Amino acid sequence: MDFDDKLEAISWVAREAGSSAEELSEASAHIAANLYTNYFNHYAGTELDLPAVPDLTA
């Protein structure tokens, strides 16, 4: 199975740092759930319950 070169490099670095396949799978699941939640909230127009952060000036 061929993977994206960047994804393969990230996976290799994570494994070299000591992450197991189970840990990488769990991290991917959390990222997917967060991404789906963000898309849904954007689509549904969910109101934020925090005040807006002021713009940064350089």
Image (cartoon, grey):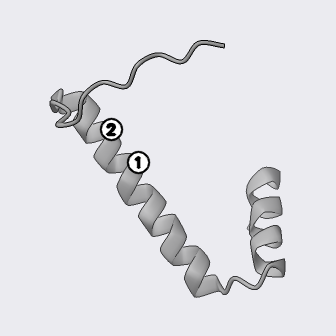
- Residue 2, visible in the rendered structure: no
Q: Is residue 51 left or right of residue 20?
A: left
Secondary structure under the numbered disc 1 in the rendered image: helix
Distance between the Cα atoms at labels 2 and 1?
6 Å
With respect to residue 3, does 43 lie above or below? above
Residue at 82% in and 71% down: 12
Nearest the viewer among 15 and 49 is: 49
Q: Which residue is mark 2?
A: 39
Image spot of residue 47 (x, y percent): 15, 30
Q: Which residue is mark 1?
A: 35
Query: In the rendered image, which quarter contains the N terminus?
Result: bottom right
Image spot of residue 2 (x, y percent): 77, 61
Residue at 67% in and 87% down: 20
Secondary structure under the numbered disc 2 in the rendered image: helix
Where residue 9 sits, quadrant-wise, is bottom right
Residues at badges 2 and 1 in contact (C-beta under 8 Å)?
yes
Nearest the viewer among 58 and 2 is: 58
Image spot of residue 46 (x, y percent): 16, 32
Q: Is residue 36 left or right of residue 57?
A: left
Image spot of residue 58 (x, y percent): 66, 13
At label 2, the amino acid type is Tyr
At label 1, the amino acid type is Leu
